[in-house]
Amino acid sequence: NVQNQTAIAFTTGGSSSAYTLTPIPAIASNAENQCFFIEPHTDPTGSPTLAISGKSALNCKYLDSTGTKQFITSSQVKAGNKYRVWNDGTDYIFGDILPQTSLLQNYFTGLGMSTAGASTTMTIAAGQASDSTNAAYMALSAAIAKTTSAWAVGTAAGGLDTGSIANSTWYHFYAIRRPDTGVVDVVFSTSASSPTLPTNYTQYRYLGSGKTNGSAQWTLFSQVGDTVLWDAATVDFDVVNPGTAAVSRTVNTPLGVKTLAQLTVGIGGFQTGSLQAVFSSLDVSDQAPQAGTTAALTGFNSSGGAGTANAWSFMPHDIRTNTSSQIRTRLSASGASDRIGCITRGWTYIR
């Protein structure tokens, strides 16, 4: 007889030491050689048992390297994975882990974010990902829309984990999953690493970030894969006579996570004649600007010759930010009309 598993494994209920299973249709009795595909909702503890369809509970065992039966532990069986389990006439024996995409480390596909801009709704596309610990697999089979209201399950419902939505603030979006039912949803938070999860949701994965405008609505952007472009690029700084010391400056990329910022950087004025600048990541050591044009072609320096006070030399530059959305700048010289500036066009997530 074949149980209707609808091409997936049954998810257990009960506790970590006394699992339950409710397949459809129910079994009439425990019988040797019955076999099931199951997904534990929590790691096993103690001497775990499994009761199926309300029948007598049997011990949960595995076969060690000598073929001896031992109680399963969290070293052999993990919540969120799927296992083949059979009744050997005495115990339920846990065997192979079923092949599944979730076992790929840091697996992530789809799940892109979009908004109409000046809107309180963010939409997350269908997709799949392993959770943050690579122990479980979560999938959105269809796009889900979340508003800036307090979190509630389902599409067109709120997505904020705690508090009230704020103006001009970065928020970070996560796919979340409750292992007892397998339901996957989305929550967003000001935390870039630890969202406040709804009750029973214990698994999560960072998807991306969005920033509110002055009216607590989402700012418009366009995302393809892991690359995000602002609909309107922003001028992040334009500093006159900034001095020659290295300075950490903030750009308009997600706060709390490192990204590859897509920038247009420039120097202007050239009161001092020839002028060089270094725009670099704070993850590497500070380096003095170098004269010449060869480095400029590689994106290391931007240089310009003598000109008027309003002259500018611009170039595109991709720079890794720190978690404070900062990069480093440094000029070779600085006079009353010398300037340094930066425009943020977008960013690429580093996964």
Image: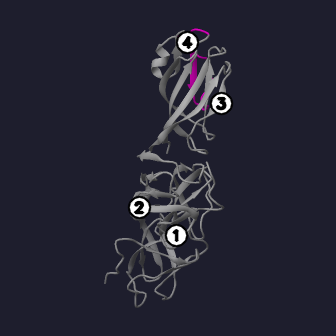
Q: Residue 198: percent from the left, percent from the top?
A: 59, 67
Badge 2 or badge 1: first in the primary sequence: 2
Q: Which residue is mark 4?
A: 308
Please give the range of residues in magenta: 272-291
As drawn, the label of residue 153 is: 1
Q: Residue at x 41, y 61 (%)?
A: 143
Determine the main secondary structure of the stretch shown in magenta.
loop
Of tags 4 and 1, the one toward the viewer is 4
Q: Secondary structure at mark 4?
A: loop
In the displayed structure, 135 sits above or below 346; it is below
Foreground residue among 312 and 6: 312
Give the x, y percent position of residue 141: 39, 64
Specify the amino acid type for callout 3: Ser
Amino acid bearing label 1: Val
- The residue lying toward the viewer, choosing from 104 and 110, is 110
Residue labelled with disc 2:
143
**Residue 216: percent from the left, percent from the top?**
59, 54
Label 3 crowd (10 A; few <14 / some 14-19 / many >=20): some
In the rendered structure, does residue 289 fall within the stretch colored magenta? yes
For badge 4, the amino acid type reads Thr
Task: State the image quarter where residue 161 is shown.
Answer: bottom right
Q: Residue furthest bottom?
A: 28
Identify the residue at image location x=48%, y=48%.
220
Q: Earlier in the sequence, mark 4 or mark 2?
A: 2
Instruction: State the CA–CA distance, disc 4 to disc 2.
Output: 53 Å
Q: Which residue is mark 3?
A: 248
347 in magenta: no
Q: Position of residue 181 (x, y in %)?
A: 49, 73
Disc nearer the start of the sequence (3/4):
3
Marks 2 and 1 close (CB-CB < 8 Å) = no
